[in-house]
Amino acid sequence: MNLLEVSQLDLAIHGTPVLESVSFAIEHGKTFGLVGESGSGKSLTALSLVNLLPPGSVRAGNGRLLDQDLFALDESQLCSVRGREIGMIFQEPMTALNPVQSIGDQVAETLIVHGACSRSEARNQACSKLERVELPPERFPPGMFPHELSGGQRQRVCIALAIALQPKLLIADEPTTALDVSTQAQILALLRSLVEHDGMSLMLITHDLAVVADMADTVAVMESGRIVEAAPTEQLFRNMRHAYTRRLLKASFHKPRRGRLNALHDQPLLRVENAVRSYRLPKSRLFSSAETLRAVNGVSFSLDRGESVGLVGESGCGKTTLTRAILGLDPLQGGQISLGGRPVLAGRKMSRSLRRRMQVVFQDPYGSFNPRHKVDRLVAEPLHLGDQSTNSARRREIVAQALEEVGLTGDDMKKYIHEFSGGQRQRIAIARALVTRPDLVVLDEAVSALDVSMRARILDLLAGLQVKHGLSYLFVSHDLTVVRVITDRVLVMYAGQIMEHGKTEDVFRNPRHSYTRQLLDAAPCIPRSWMQG
Amino acid sequence: MLRYTLVRFLSLCVTLVAASLVVFLVVEIIPGDPASFMLGLNAEPDTVAALRKELGLSGSLGSRYLDWAGGMMVGDFGRSYTYRVPVAELVVARIQVSLPLAFYALLLSTAIAFPVGIMAASRRGSILDIGIMGSTQLGIAVPNFWFAMLLVLVFAVGLRWFAAGGFAGWDQGVLVGLKSLTLPAIALAVTQASILARVMRSALIDTLGQDFIRTARAKGLTRRQALTRHALRNALIPVLTIIGLQFSFLLAGAIIIENVFFLPGLGRLIFQGITQRDLIVVESVVMLLVFAVIVVNFLVDIAYALVDPRLRIRQ
């Protein structure tokens, strides 16, 4: 008998159908993977099971957890199912915990709310649950608060509170999407051990095919509210029947066609020499001297005109700090950075003509735009760095041209940013970076928030623009697959230093440094043998 | 937490010194001689000279400031020119009215605003929410002196439950004193409660949309439990800010209500001080109010850290 059986699940929100006859089953002690692009209805399927849907939702169909009819339960019965029989963890560990409550209390609450034990007993239990998710009380006392933990550690706390009552089913909704590869590998290993040793069933929702290939026993593929294909994992990968599944797979391995640029080797475009950037840590005692953290510790590299260089490393390795120094946003404490032979200085000291020559595209396509400005103003903003002032007609022309170059239309300039999808927003961010005709574009996790199909299209766009305008890219990312397909050379950064650098293919094929090997091993992958034929 | 408190306390002291300098210098830079300004155009030169001496206007600027500031620290605020009594005596009498009135009004406003704001937020968009939002709008729009007069008409003139004005004093018991402050406290609380309820509602609605509320619900908490155990404490930060501002306002800004109810409070004292050009009273009472506001802000800062562990600097 299956643990969970869902059949003919329909869901409409304010009259708009979002799920249509979704049916699947999850066996005892097995992992079920649900994959699809963003907006395909994966999360809503999970939320339908425990009826935590947005207002205006109407649900129909059947859902059985063992002999319990989930869809017939009233709200108070559902409250005793949530957390006790079905535990859930979500994508954003940074915001999923209450910032003003200690981690021990948050784990204990699951036990207290379900009346499983007394308050003091719950506190002891919470410690052992935190230990189960590898947060031992010696280093992570239950009185710690979420802001004192990293993203991966917070996700462990979320798992601890979800499994505190040994639920039969654990739903993990994109549990590792916001984490870097090494942390992702650790969290996935923890989830796997919960299934193997604690007898839980796992419903794993993700857009990453490699993660399901690694984790799931059976997989269902979802497209616009329907399950288009479902099979045991190996069978599904060996024999993909539906065109959408094949498209997803192709997109996740997509390699953009990169035209050859004649890199001019006479003088590097960007030169970073012995860069040092340190931060003062908060004092541990009132009168002790402050310690410093060297976030970037003697980094040197150069980047030629027309070249793409990848900068990879896990979160906290100093990538962002280095990027900010290169962009002239933060000063260096040692060493120097130059662009085209002219020194890059922080703040107002740098001339506008130099600043114009480098632009940046950030990860969050929504957060990096002012929501109250229209697209024409957003895209035209860097134009003030130009030498002569541009009149409004000319400005419109430039904006329209930039938007068309990134695959949008000139009419889009009259819209606001919320009217666009994530992929379109990232196109607008690229258009904004291009209007000043820069030499160097820094892409800071620029495709990390996009799902595979959108990512593939943006990578194509970037490759095309590079040839057309002779751009150089500095591609900062924790996503190794992306770096591999779009860069010529790669720098591997760890604890503020460059551990290894070389031609991308060489580094990926024969990593010399142990840290690089560790990073490459951590990335989940689809077994090669599954994809022959 | 200790470190945070210490840092806040140091900033309190610095602010106090800076504020006292400003208050002192403002009186100093008033054009002309403060003594002749206080006595008016037709004053005899002897009287002016006598007042100058009384005001401590002889001596250097620095030593005068030190005398004034040092005197206040030991409770010597100087003598009022018009009342001919030590300012400290005047202030003590007035503070016995103003401080309880401010607390009373704040307590009422919080007691009304919390449940009302929580109800509106938890039933967002319902008839109840719309009704609450409408009436708080009205509560803010209605001038409190008009509302005060309405209260007098209904409860003092009509029903005769309360006296129409005056303060009975604390000698005849706490209840008698509180009774004479009830109508003024209600009149003051209505506006404050309306503002606070709106802040509470919007802060709660913001918090209820956060990811950790979804986590709480996925744990098995009911909607109400998620609200009381998780959302409320997070929503408290903007609410505390408003409460702090309101207390400062109630302490000195109740002057119109004090006038409507003939209450001998601080607001009236400072008003009389200004009209009678009694600079000694004005200077001292302003300084006292500045002190109260700074202390309240300090307490609000401490309350922030109690509510939000992210603000505490870890030992």
Image (spheres, rainbow, N blue to C red):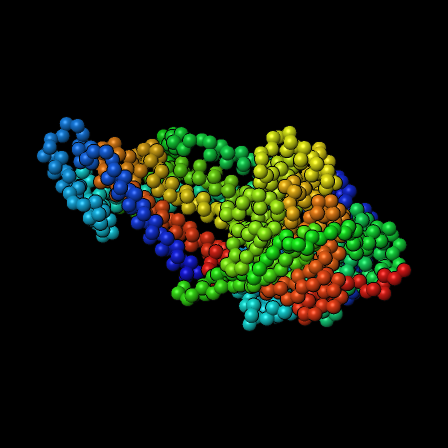
Spot occupied by residue A335 in the image (x, y as percentages of width and height)? 53, 59
- Asked whether, in this view, residue B45 is left or right of residue A456, the answer is left
- A133 lies above or below B206: below
- Residue placed most toward the observer, A36 or A86: A36
Closer to the camera, A325 or A139? Answer: A325
* Residue at position x 59%, y 57% in the image: A272
Q: Is residue A145 visible?
A: no
How many tags in the picture? 0
In this rendering, would A531 be left or right of B28? right
Within the image, what quadrant is residue B130 found in? Answer: top right
Q: Position of residue A324 (x, y in %)?
A: 57, 53
- Where is residue A233 drawn, in percent x and y? 83, 62
Q: Residue furthest left?
A: B46
Q: Quarter of the image containing the C terminus of chain A?
A: bottom right
Left or right of residue A149, residue A257 in this image: right
Task: Describe residue B34's horizontal placement relative to residue B300 as left or right.
Answer: left
Query: Residue extending furthest top?
Result: B42
Q: Is residue A352 visible?
A: yes
The structure residue drawn at horizontal position 68% and vertical position 67%, both measured from the top left corner, is: A516
Farthest residue to the front: give it: A266
Residue at left offset 44%, top offset 37% = B190
Q: Which image quarter holds the N terminus of chain A? A: bottom right
Q: A353 above or below A85? A: above
Residue A317 coordinates in the image, percent (x, y): 60, 62
**Residue at image coords 74%, 51%:** A261
| Nearer to me, A463 or A94 | A463
Q: Is B257 in front, or is A476?
A: A476
